[in-house]
Image (tube, grey):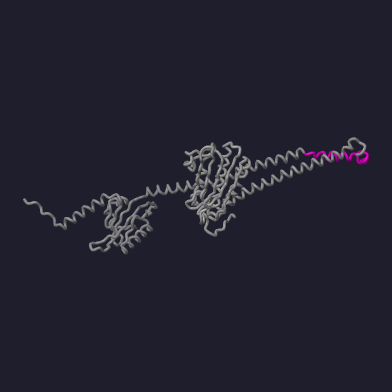
Amino acid sequence: MSPPASPPPVAADALLDHVLVNAFLNGVPDLVYFKDRESRFIAVSRSKAARHRLEPAALVGKTDADFFSAEHAQWARVDEENIMNTGAPVLGKLEKITWPDGRESWAHSTKLPLRGEHGEIIGTFGLSRDVTAERDTELALEKAQRDIVDASRAAGMAEVATGVLHNVGNVLTSVNVSAGVIASTLHQSKVESLGRLAALLEEHAPRLGEFLTVDAKGRRVPELLAALATQAVAERDRLLGEIESLQKNIDHIKEIVAMQQAYATMVGVVEPLEATAMMEDAVRMNRGALVRHDVRVVRAFAPVPPVLAEKAKVLQILVNLIRNAKYATDDSGAADKLITLRIEPAFAGASAAEAVADKPAGRPGFVRFIVQDNGVGVPAENLTKIFQHGFTTRAHGHGFGLHSSAGAAVEMNGSLTVHSDGPGRGATFVLELPVAPDGAIPTNS
């Protein structure tokens, strides 16, 4: 008996194609579909059908409008018409899919023209991969990042607010001292003696001349009046001095609060700023604490162009750096507590020393705000951790200030760095901010 005849080559190729297509459509995990020119399904993968809880044959002849929202079906039809008209594929498109019951999912879709035997476009086909879980994770990470940025910004503003309250508290201490002196002076006043003296003179009014010249008590009246006058003048001068101090301290409190209010209203506004004015504002915000702790401040401000930055963020950083420098000098126990504030131009590729010593030609690209102290210093192992969230070496510190300051500097296209030769050698913090365009007029000059 002779073996069965082999099928003709054309029939064998067709059988192989059928086997391969079936194997592909039944096994591929991604969602695969083929459509005619009317966007009707002519074949789908088993995974695609399972997505709709159907058998593949049940999708044949249907369109996206039978399974998705009208809006999604409309946009899918627009894509397919464009592919059939131009032959241009859609590759790796991230699509948001809305289902009829309101559910939402995400997919990466690739859509291509489906061509016939002679190259003519007879429809479209595509592959879609569900990325809902990945997209949800990505959105959650983005939200977490925004929350961290918002928390850092809030922490930074809290640092400034804490600084404001701390300095207002220092000034209020002086206010309380002045109020105590005034109250004590008034309580110890001899003004009641004038009343007794007036009663004594009224009692001897009929023979006042004899009383003042003959009577032993009467002869002491001029002496007593002179003593009371001297004491009254001294009390007046002392009270005026305390009232003047009181007025200055109240004005200082008003200045601190008004400055904070002015900066708080400018959050998010990038504008040209005068560097010296920014540094002086930060010093004023810390003045009460600096005076109270006997910290000497030395200024060395070189001429620089305006910087382009946000007022509130720059104040946040500088207030924090000066306050930290105050703590560092205070903790060192040094007899001469010194903070040196410098403002210098920063040229591309030049160090801080070169920028001043060599004075390269051209306009600087950045301005450096430098806060240097002779305090406790920073160990080498902490230099790489000092800007990390939550890192602090102070007993009552929380580690938000420098972290939020570094983040604020980056947000303004600048940087915040630190240098220290080690414990007991002090520390230098450098804030670099970009210069404003030529001709920019500072809003805080």
Q: Which residue is more in the foreground, 195 or 394?
A: 394
Quarter of the image for residue 241 reads: top right
Q: Is residue 220 left or right of residue 436?
A: right
Q: Residue at x 82, y 40 (%)?
A: 228
Q: Is residue 209 magenta?
A: yes
* Residue 320 appears in view: no
Q: Position of residue 199 (x, y in %)?
A: 86, 39
3 with respect to 288 (left or right): left
Is 329 in the magenta? no
Q: Is residue 45 visible?
A: yes
**Magenta: predominant secondary structure element?**
helix
Q: Position of residue 45 (x, y in %)?
A: 28, 52
Picture coordinates of residue 23, whole percent (x, y): 23, 51
Above or below residue 5? Residue 180 is above
User: Of 434 and 77, which appears nearest the observer?
Assistant: 434
Which quadrant of the structure image shows residue 441? bottom right
**Which quadrant, please, contains the C terminus?**
bottom right
Residue that protrudes farthest toward the top in the picture: 216
Q: Give left or right: position of 357 versus 81.
A: right
Q: Position of residue 272 (x, y in %)?
A: 55, 56
Q: Which stretch appears magenta?
A: 189-211
Q: How many marks?
A: 0
Q: Residue furthest left?
A: 1
Quadrant of residue 396 in the image?
top right
